[in-house]
Structure formats: C-alpha cells, structure tokens
Amino acid sequence: MKKIKLFPLIGSFAENKDKARDIRIKAIIPILEKGQDLVLDFEKVDEVTQSFAHALISDLIRNYGIDVLDRISFANCNKTVSKIIEIVVDYMQ
C-alpha cells in the first residue's frame, strides 16, 4: 500500500484544484494503474474546498467506478475534511 502525504504538497488549506488535478494525474493514477492500494494522508490539512476534493477524486470514480474507493483510504481527516470528501463521493454516486 502506498501513502501520499498531502500536507507537503498542498499546505493546511487545500483549495487549488489544479494542484489536486496534478496529484491525481502524477501520483494517484500511477499507483492505481500498478494495482496498488493507496492512502491519502490528510495529516495537518485543516480544510479542503469542495472543488479541490472534486478535482482530486471525482475523475477516479468516473473512470474506475465507485469501487475504486475500496482501494483508496483517507487517513487523518478531521471532521471538516471528512464531510467534504463525503459530499463529493455522494455527488458522484
């Protein structure tokens, strides 16, 4: 299982959807394409915008199906981050 620590890439406030897209394309997809599971570690990330979360995971769900979420874990999410991720996942179903 691979881990991507998001704080060094995005800081404590994840708002830049272009960075989210880059993380998805350059880090997440290659891991999934190798058949590996993934942990997205949100330690020290205090907030994410809905547009960031959408850019990070919605295309994964669209392209791989909702079951891709069985291969991705979201670690160290506070309540705010968890809620935003939940909203995006619900929207994509």
Image (tube, grey):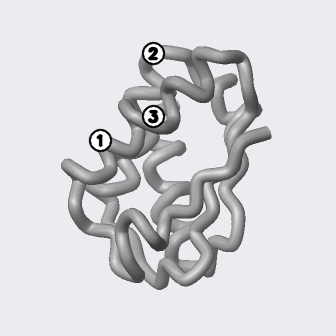
Foreground of the two, 8 or 38? 8
The residue sitting at 72% across, 48% down in the picture is 73
* Mark closer to the observer (1, 2): 1
Q: Judge whether 61 appears above or below 44 on screen.
A: above
Q: Judge whether 50 appears above or below 81 on screen.
A: above
How crowded pointer 3 is (Cα within 10 Å; few <14, some 14-19, many 20+) is rated as: some
First reached walking from the N terminus: tag 1 or tag 2 = 1
Q: Position of residue 49 (x, y in %)?
A: 32, 67
Quadrant, the N terminus = top right
Foreground of the two, 70 or 41? 41
The residue where tag 2 is placed is 63
How crowded pointer 1 is (Cα within 10 Å; few <14, some 14-19, many 20+) is rated as: some
Q: Which mark is residue 21?
A: 1
- Say what amino acid the circle numbered 1 marks: Arg
- Say what amino acid the circle numbered 2 marks: Asn
Q: Position of residue 74 (x, y in %)?
A: 66, 56
The residue sitting at 38% across, 28% down in the picture is 59
Picture quadrant of residue 77: bottom right
For marks 1 and 2, give the CA distance: 14 Å
First reached walking from the N terminus: tag 1 or tag 3 = 1
- Say what amino acid the circle numbered 3 marks: Met
Q: Are marks 1 and 3 in contact (CB under 8 Å)?
A: no
The residue where tag 3 is placed is 92
Q: Position of residue 34 (x, y in %)?
A: 65, 17
